Image (tube, grey):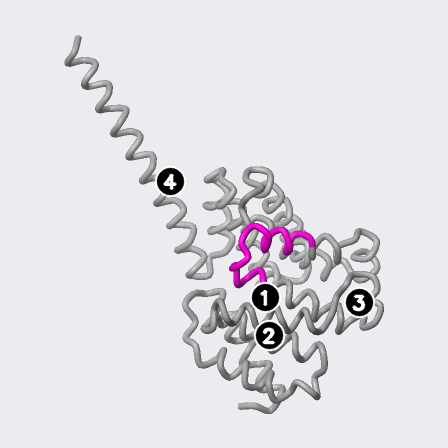
């Protein structure tokens, strides 16, 4: 009897360890697919984990594929699916800052394809800002969230000016402060540098031209470490060329 119990215990321990390794392998497989640019596959692998982390990663993967790669007719459905996955990530773990950030990103992409009137009607500007701010409340040192909030302020001011400040509390000062904070936290982040340059150009293309060019040059000098950053690298090179900063 004692020997049987021992065998059962060893089997339980083995299965527990094996199961833990399989889960770790699965998330690593999702990350590998993401790094190689297989974003749809990465989303499916990550979603199948059934975790908040997995759903947030799946939302990120679909949003990237939708924005950079998918044909125009497929973008809305991909962004909608990304939003659903991000919302589930939040439900699974409301303390996961990445879940809130990916919800903000998915909603932001939804607003872009839906048009200004729909975005205003459904309150996307406020919802996106609130989701980013929740991510920062949970993790004040989350560089990506600072970039997103900075881009939100820059985009709102660039599009709405005085009315953006009046309606949403957007400001150029907040945009610049969050961009600078992001670079303090991640000075060699290609995405942060690119988004900072883009934000400056949306605020005042002529006044900020020189600084935007320098930021884009810094971004391009950094080697892209995965497929997403290769896409950003290409965008940065195109933007720099358009500014005459080759």
**Residue at (53% x, 45% y) in the render:** 55
**In front of the other: label 2 or label 3?**
3
Q: Which residue is mark 1?
A: 147
What numbered label is drawn on residue 165? 3
Q: CA distance from mark 1 to mark 3?
A: 19 Å
Q: Are marks 1 and 2 in contact (CB under 8 Å)?
A: yes
Q: Secondary structure at mark 1?
A: helix
Q: Which residue is mark 2?
A: 196
Q: CA distance from mark 2 to mark 4?
A: 36 Å
Q: CA distance from mark 1 to mark 2?
A: 8 Å
The percent coordinates of residue 143 (x first, y second) are: 53, 63
The percent coordinates of residue 81 (x first, y second) are: 63, 47
Q: Residue furthest left?
A: 3
What numbered label is drawn on residue 23? 4
Q: Residues within 10 Å of mark 4 (few under 14, many from 20)?
A: few
Q: Secondary structure at mark 3?
A: helix
**Start-end of magenta stretch:** 130-146
Q: Image height check: is 2 above or below 92? A: above
Q: Image height check: is 220 above or below 54? A: below
Task: Tell me the quarter of the picture where residue 239 sits.
Answer: bottom right
**In front of the other: label 2 or label 4?**
2
What numbered label is drawn on residue 103? none
Q: Earlier in the sequence, mark 4 or mark 1?
A: 4
Q: Earlier in the sequence, mark 2 or mark 3?
A: 3
Q: Nearer the viewer, residue 87 or 22?
A: 87
């Amino acid at each position: 009897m004692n020997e049987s119990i021992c065998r059962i215990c060893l089997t339980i321990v083995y299965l527990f360890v094996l199961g833990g390794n399989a889960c770790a392998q699965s998330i690593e497989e999702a990350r590998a697919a993401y790094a190689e640019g297989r974003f749809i596959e990465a989303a499916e692998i990550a979603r199948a984990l059934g975790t908040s982390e997995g759903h947030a990663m799946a939302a990120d993967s679909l949003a990237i594929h939708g924005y950079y790669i998918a044909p125009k007719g497929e973008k809305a459905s991909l962004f909608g699916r990304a939003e659903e996955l991000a919302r589930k990530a939040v439900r699974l773990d409301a303390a996961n800052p990445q879940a809130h950030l990916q919800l903000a990103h998915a909603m932001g992409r939804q607003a872009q394809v839906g048009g200004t009137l729909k975005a205003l009607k459904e309150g996307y500007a406020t919802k996106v800002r609130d989701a980013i701010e929740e991510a920062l409340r949970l993790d004040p040192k989350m560089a990506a969230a600072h970039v997103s909030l900075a881009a939100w302020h820059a985009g709102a001011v660039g599009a709405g000016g005085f009315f953006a400040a009046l309606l949403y509390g957007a400001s150029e000062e907040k945009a610049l402060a969050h961009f600078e904070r992001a670079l303090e936290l991640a000075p060699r982040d290609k995405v942060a540098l690119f988004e900072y340059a883009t934000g400056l150009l949306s605020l005042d293309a002529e006044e900020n031209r020189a600084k935007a060019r320098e930021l884009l040059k810094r971004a391009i000098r950094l080697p892209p470490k995965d497929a997403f950053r290769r896409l950003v690298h290409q965008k940065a090179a195109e933007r720099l060329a358009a500014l005459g900063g080759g």
